[in-house]
Every structure is written in structure tokens, then in C-alpha cells.
Image (spheres, rainbow, N blue to C red):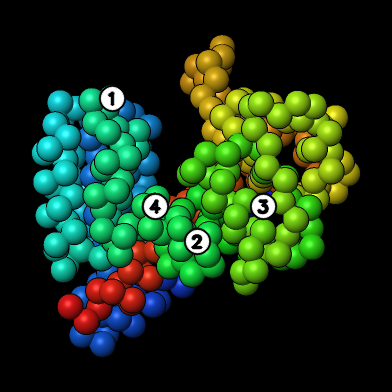
């Protein structure tokens, strides 16, 4: 069994981005600029935005964070999005999810300029992904592709089973793996909460990607020997330890790792790659749409 070390791989990619950014600056150009909008004080969202900002600055990107009060109105948020859409110094930006209940998430995402949608959530960019003409891909699925590629795991012709069908992870990764992309051409089965006899499908997987949001759903008897496992889930489970909790994923790591050929840990697997993919999309936005402005 080999651990797919997302921390190590993301660190290698960030070094590459830092070199590219240094070259940009050496040519007298401005650095790529990513911005983030955070509404409210959700601890997980705050931590995630802080990590994104730290990663961006570590590779030489300009990073700006707009922190808004929980009571910010939808109109006020839309006005900030319009401002960033028009700012030629900002190459891409994200609106951290989830948003407060009084704000319509779909309306907010649809308001983002698709050329600055580095999260890859805008329907325009999702549509381009489906047709094979995508510029920006959702960050977590893109991170998964990078993990597989950098780990030397062949995808073409393999049976990939995806557990979870969200628009953020499950659906886009199923599309990306099945299409005639550079790193695709897999046969994909997508499962979800309504799938009957889930283990029938997971046992067939050469590559199993789990993004269903249920702690340790996948047990050792649900996979075959030699499977490659990508665990997207992350959960804080209360316990009697000094910290008062432990972190686990959607996969029972202790059981499944005994049968897997490769497996991502939680934490330290997919998470770091999501942030790297945001940087990748920002660099793409800079090179394709922003550098000459």
C-alpha cells in the first residue's frame, strides 16, 4: 500500500508556480492576483480562506481577502462581485461557500464573470467542461486528476467508481475522467445516496473516488484488492482525546488501506490539492485573459 501524499505533491507544484511567477515578475509584469470573498465567521470557511491566501502569497501571487459581516445583504455581495468583475488587476476570485441562508448561492455564482471564475462553478464553465472545451475546472476534481497523474496512476481504460454526485466534486470528476481528455478515457460509474447495493459497485472499482459526506462509509469488505482510493470527505469526530476530536474521511482508512494499492490520507490528501488547483486556475486566467491588461 502506498500513501498518495497530497501535501508533498502540492508542495512540488507550488515550487513550480513560484518559479513561473518569478519569471513573470522578472519580465516586468505584475503578479497574478486572486481574491476571495468570505461572508460570516464560519470557522471552517475562515480556515480554508486563510490557507488559500497563505498558499497564494507563498508562490508570489497577489492575494486579497474581502471579509464581510454575516448580515451582509445579497445586494451588497452582488455589488462587490460586480466590482471585482470589472477590476483589471484581479485575475480571478472565489466566493467562499456556504453562504448565509438569506443569500441565493446560485444567483451569486451566476454573477461571477466566467473569465474570473477560478472555482470553476459558473454554468458557463461547467458547460465548457462537458463539451471538452473547458478553461477552468472545479478545483477539487482538478486536484484529484493532478494527484492521480503525479502518482503515476493510469486512468485510461480503468473502471472508476465515484460515490457522490454534487456539482462541486462528484459530477465534474465523473465527467472529466470519462471524456477524451489528456487524463481521462476511463469507464465511470457514479453512485449516490439512493444507490442500492452500493458495495456491488464499489467492489468493481479499479479507482474509487468517495465524496459523499458520510464518515467512514466505505469499509474494507466493500473494495477489491489493489484498488486506488481517493477520499474527498473530511469530518471532525468528537472523542475523549486531548484535542477532543479526530479527523476522518468518507473511507475507513484502517480497513481499506489493507487492500488498497494507493490511498489518500485524511487530512493531507485531496485538501492541499484543491488549493493548488485554485492557483492553477488563477495562473490560467492571468495568462489567457489578464496579463496584457
Q: Is residue 216 above or below residue 163?
A: above
Question: Sequence order check: which comes first, mark 1 or mark 4?
Answer: 1
Is label 4 in contact with label 2 (beta carbons under 8 Å)?
A: no
- In what quadrant of the picture does the C terminus appear? bottom left
Q: Label 3: which residue?
A: 4
Residue beneath label 2, please? Answer: 129
In whole angstroms, how far apart are the C-alphas of marks 2 and 1?
Answer: 29 Å
Residue in the image at 27% along x and 69% along y: 32
Residue assigned mark 4: 123
- Can you tell which quarter of the image residue 260 is in? top right
Question: Residue 267's image quarter?
Answer: top right
**What secondary structure is found at the residue carrying circle 3?**
loop
Query: Which element type, helix, strand or loop, lies under badge 4?
Result: helix
Q: Is residue 161 left or right of residue 179?
A: right
- Mark closer to the chain start, 1 or 3: 3
* Residue highlighted by disc 1: 101
Indicate which disc, 2 or 3, sits on the residue closer to the N terminus: 3
Amino acid at each position: 500500500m502506498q500513501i498518495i501524499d497530497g501535501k508533498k505533491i502540492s508542495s512540488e507544484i507550488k515550487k513550480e508556480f513560484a518559479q513561473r511567477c518569478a519569471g513573470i515578475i522578472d519580465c516586468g509584469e505584475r503578479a497574478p492576483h486572486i481574491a476571495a470573498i468570505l461572508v460570516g465567521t464560519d470557522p471552517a470557511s475562515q480556515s480554508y480562506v486563510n490557507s488559500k491566501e497563505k498558499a497564494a502569497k507563498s508562490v508570489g501571487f497577489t492575494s486579497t481577502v474581502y471579509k464581510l459581516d454575516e448580515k451582509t445583504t445579497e445586494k451588497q455581495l452582488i455589488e462587490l462581485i460586480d466590482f471585482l468583475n470589472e477590476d483589471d488587476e484581479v485575475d480571478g476570485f472565489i466566493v467562499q461557500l456556504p453562504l448565509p441562508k438569506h443569500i441565493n448561492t446560485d444567483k451569486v455564482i451566476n454573477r461571477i464573470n466566467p473569465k474570473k471564475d477560478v472555482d470553476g462553478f459558473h454554468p458557463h464553465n461547467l458547460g465548457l467542461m462537458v463539451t471538452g472545451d473547458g478553461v477552468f475546472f472545479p478545483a477539487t476534481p482538478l486536484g484529484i486528476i493532478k494527484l492521480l497523474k503525479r502518482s503515476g496512476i493510469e486512468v485510461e481504460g480503468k473502471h472508476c467508481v465515484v460515490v457522490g454526485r454534487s456539482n462541486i466534486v462528484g459530477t465534474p470528476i465523473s465527467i472529466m475522467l470519462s471524456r477524451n481528455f489528456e487524463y481521462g478515457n476511463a469507464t465511470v460509474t457514479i453512485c449516490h445516496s439512493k444507490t442500492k447495493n452500493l458495495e456491488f459497485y464499489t467492489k468493481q472499482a479499479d479507482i474509487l473516488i468517495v465524496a459523499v459526506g458520510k464518515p467512514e462509509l466505505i469499509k474494507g469488505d466493500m473494495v477489491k484488492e489493489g484498488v486506488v482510493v481517493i477520499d474527498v470527505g473530511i469530518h471532525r469526530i468528537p472523542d475523549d482525546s486531548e484535542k477532543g476530536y479526530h479527523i476522518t474521511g468518507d473511507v475507513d482508512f484502517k480497513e481499506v488501506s489493507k487492500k488498497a494499492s494507493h490511498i489518500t490520507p485524511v487530512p493531507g490528501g485531496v485538501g492541499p490539492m484543491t488549493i493548488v488547483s485554485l492557483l492553477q486556475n488563477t495562473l490560467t486566467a492571468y495568462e489567457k485573459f489578464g496579463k496584457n491588461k
